[in-house]
Amino acid sequence: MASSSIPVKVGCQLQAHIQQQIGEDGLYESASEYIRALIRRDLQSREEAWETLQKDLAPAMRADDSEFVTVTAEDVIRRNQRR
């Protein structure tokens, strides 16, 4: 897999946080390694969120049309105003 560099500017607080994550006291060898780990974690979180959404929607996708109730935008607005 080819790699490329992406220059990234971070503020003082972010730089300090990155420095805490790398080196002898941190879990990572370099800032690049830490940032790659964050990106991988973000990708995994998105995949898990997509799987959860699909799981949550599955019953509705299998439901018969007779199980659904027609509502208007006004119905939804009124319902939400009561909350």
Image (cartoon, grey):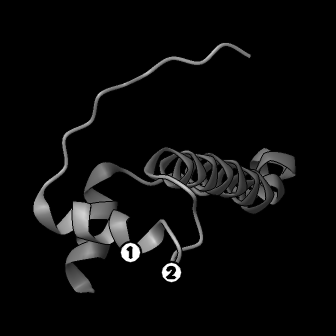
Query: How many residues crowd mark 1 within 10 Å: few (<14), some (14–19), many (20+)?
Result: some
Amino acid at pointer 2: Asp
Amino acid at pointer 1: Gln
Q: How many angstroms separate mark 1 from mark 2 (CA)? A: 7 Å
In the foreground, 42 or 27: 27
Q: Quadrant of residue 43?
A: top right
Residue at x-position 50% and y-position 80% = 25
Give x and y (percent) for residue 15.
Answer: 24, 60
Give the residue pinned by disc 2.
Answer: 25
Residue at x-position 82% and y-position 59% = 59
Residue at x-position 62% and y-position 57% = 45
Dots 1, 2 in contact, CB < 8 A: yes
Residue 52 vs 47, above or below: the answer is below
Give the residue pinned by disc 1.
Answer: 20
In the foreground, 54 or 51: 51
In the foreground, 82 or 13: 13
Give x and y (percent) for residue 26.
Answer: 52, 75
Residue at x-position 56% and y-position 45% = 36
Q: Mark 2: which secondary structure?
A: loop
In this rendering, would 10 be left or right of 6? left
